């Protein structure tokens, strides 16, 4: 898992290392998904609270498990 | 029955399991080494995006057919989630491209189609922001969604004929058996999560549309005075 | 029998709308002249922007031609329904549903014809400015130009109607149209370039088929959706 010369390995048939790219992809993707889910649930909670009779929104977002 | 919370929860759990599996347990890809592990998030994102945008398309037809705001809200909710997923797809795709092909951007059919898709459906969302009248907005965004969606296969095949650098479609047949299972779990996880988020967005958007529709009608202006002249 | 009679009457209406539209454009032909100058200017700009690299200019002449046509089409399409909007005639379209499809096809045909004419006018300029040549048959070139212009006109006319009464019309029309016509643009550029620079592997046919498929799909789909758009 050593970060070998990724760019130099292009065309050589086997790519060595490259974990940097993997972490960036997973990191950004999960962050976007978690944030967007949180936003969606917050907005939903507000909409539901406004729809029903005035009572505090009782639904908490589920605990997100992250890798 | 509020499905969105269980869906989001289940999706998140499945996705986590699949990613831990794919990142740390499954073997590295034959040609691409560890970079191939991007597969477990890139492919599920692509499938989820396609399904979500298809739902938006179906909702657009429903909206035109029934003129109901429930369908209208679904068009917007699923288009929004679809745009976010497709934008994510673009980012993932270029991160994959750099170590495998040496460039961040290239004339790959899937990458370029995703770019066109993002702009197309972003246009639908922009249209919805600009049009104030609810009925016109329903019609206009449904039409734009239908036209945009119909374009997707055409765009894909057109670009494919230009050049094909991308590997063949990652169905379980072309993926090593040790990688199929985490990929499948990830695909379902992402799909459930995406649908759950879209449903949550749907509730908020539908509530907003109903609030708009229920806005108190202004009282009629008093009848114009008739002063007898012509 | 009445189905045939209906079809014929719709065809007649289409021709009526087409003639009326072309007549209006003919009477305002100074505008058409200005549009041709605009298209020519864009070709010039490409020539300046790319620089004196003759090989590059020749190789990409097809691309420059179609980009010029695309940008000019926004001005052309923008006008499509403005007369109706200005004279308040949009509402009368709603009252006559049997005429709606005829109105769409008449206008779309009018736009396609005008664009094709513009393309035909620009081609000699392309040959001159970018040191182009015509390697293949002029017929093939003509077919490519017409199919490409038809591909731009079908969704373009629908979007013109859709955005006709909106304030941000001039921004929305290109924003919606440009990503949509990417396959049409691709196929048109490819077909035109191959006819101009040579087609050793006989690929022009596949590109023309793609263009035809795009045209068929969008002329059908937009015709169906036009009624909904007008009613809004």
Image: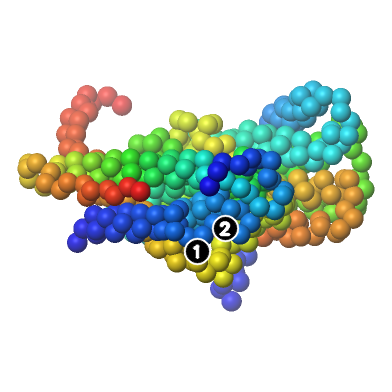
- Tell me if I can see residue C173 in this picture: no
- Seen as rendered, the residue at the extreme front is A2
Please name the residue that numbered disc 2 is placed on: B29
Q: Pointer 2 indicates a residue of which chain?
A: B
Q: Position of residue C3 (x, y in %)?
A: 56, 72
Question: Is the residue C57 above or below the residue C117 in the image?
Answer: above
Task: Tell me what residue is drawn at x 76 percent, y 35 percent.
Answer: C64
> For this view, does C20 lie left or right of residue B226?
right
Contact between labelled residues 2 and 1, with CB atoms less than 8 Å apart? yes
Q: Is C126 in front, or is A41?
A: A41
* Badge 2 density bin: few <14, some 14–19, many ≥20, Cα 10 Å: some
Question: Is the residue B168 above or below the residue A50 in the image?
Answer: below
Please name the residue that numbered disc 1 is placed on: B179
Q: Is C190 in front, or is A18?
A: A18
> For this view, does B95 lie left or right of residue C199?
left
Decide which of tag 1 and tag 2 comes sooner along the chain.
2
Q: Quadrant of residue C170?
A: top right
Q: Position of residue B99 (x, y in %)?
A: 62, 44
């Amino acid at each position: 898992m050593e970060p070998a010369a990724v760019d130099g390995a292009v065309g050589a048939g086997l790519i060595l290392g490259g974990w940097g790219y993997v972490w960036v992809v997973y990191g950004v993707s999960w962050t976007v998904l978690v944030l967007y889910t949180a936003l969606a649930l917050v907005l939903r909670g507000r909409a539901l609270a406004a729809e029903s009779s005035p009572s505090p929104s009782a639904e908490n977002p589920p605990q997100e498990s992250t890798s | 029955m509020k499905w969105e919370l269980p869906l989001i929860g289940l999706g998140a759990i499945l996705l986590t399991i699949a990613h831990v599996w794919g990142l740390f347990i499954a073997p590295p890809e034959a040609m691409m080494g560890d970079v191939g592990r991007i597969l477990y998030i890139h492919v599920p994102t692509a499938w989820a995006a396609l399904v979500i945008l298809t739902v938006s398309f179906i909702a657009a037809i429903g909206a035109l057919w029934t003129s109901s705001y429930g369908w209208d809200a679904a068009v917007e909710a699923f288009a929004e989630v679809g745009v976010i997923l497709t934008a994510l797809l673009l980012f993932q795709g270029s991160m994959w491209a750099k170590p495998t092909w040496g460039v961040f951007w290239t004339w790959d059919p899937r990458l370029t189609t995703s770019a066109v898709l993002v702009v197309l459906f972003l246009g639908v969302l922009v249209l919805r922001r600009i049009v104030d009248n609810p009925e016109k907005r329903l019609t206009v965004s449904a039409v734009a969604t239908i036209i945009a969606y119909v374009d997707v296969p055409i765009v894909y095949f057109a670009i494919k004929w230009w050049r094909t650098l991308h590997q063949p479609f990652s169905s379980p047949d072309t993926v090593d058996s040790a990688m199929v299972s985490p990929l499948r779990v990830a695909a379902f996880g992402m799909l459930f999560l995406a649908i759950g988020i879209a449903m949550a967005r749907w509730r908020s958007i539908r509530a907003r549309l109903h609030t708009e529709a229920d806005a108190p009608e202004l009282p009629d202006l008093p009848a114009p005075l008739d002063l007898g002249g012509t | 029998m009445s189905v045939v009679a209906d079809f014929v009457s719709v065809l007649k209406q289409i021709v009526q709308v087409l003639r009326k539209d072309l007549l209006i454009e003919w009477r305002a032909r100074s505008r058409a002249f200005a549009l041709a100058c605009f298209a020519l200017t864009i070709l010039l700009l490409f020539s300046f922007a790319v620089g004196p690299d003759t090989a590059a200019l020749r190789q990409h002449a097809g691309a420059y031609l179609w980009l010029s046509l695309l940008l000019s089409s926004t001005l052309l399409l923008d006008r499509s329904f403005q007369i109706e909007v200005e004279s308040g005639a949009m509402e009368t379209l709603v009252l006559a549903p049997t005429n709606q499809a005829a109105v769409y096809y008449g206008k779309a045909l009018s736009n396609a014809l005008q664009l094709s004419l513009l393309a035909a006018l620009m081609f000699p300029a392309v040959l001159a400015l970018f040191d182009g040549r015509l390697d293949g048959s002029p017929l093939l070139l003509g077919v490519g130009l017409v199919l490409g212009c038809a591909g731009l006109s079908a969704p373009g006319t629908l979007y013109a109607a859709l955005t006709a009464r909106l304030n941000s019309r001039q921004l929305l029309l290109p924003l919606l149209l440009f990503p949509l016509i990417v396959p049409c643009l691709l196929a048109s550029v490819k077909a035109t370039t191959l006819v101009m620079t040579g087609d050793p592997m006989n690929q022009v046919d596949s590109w023309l088929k793609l263009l035809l498929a795009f045209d068929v799909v969008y002329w059908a789909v937009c015709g169906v959706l036009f009624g909904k758009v007008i009613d809004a």
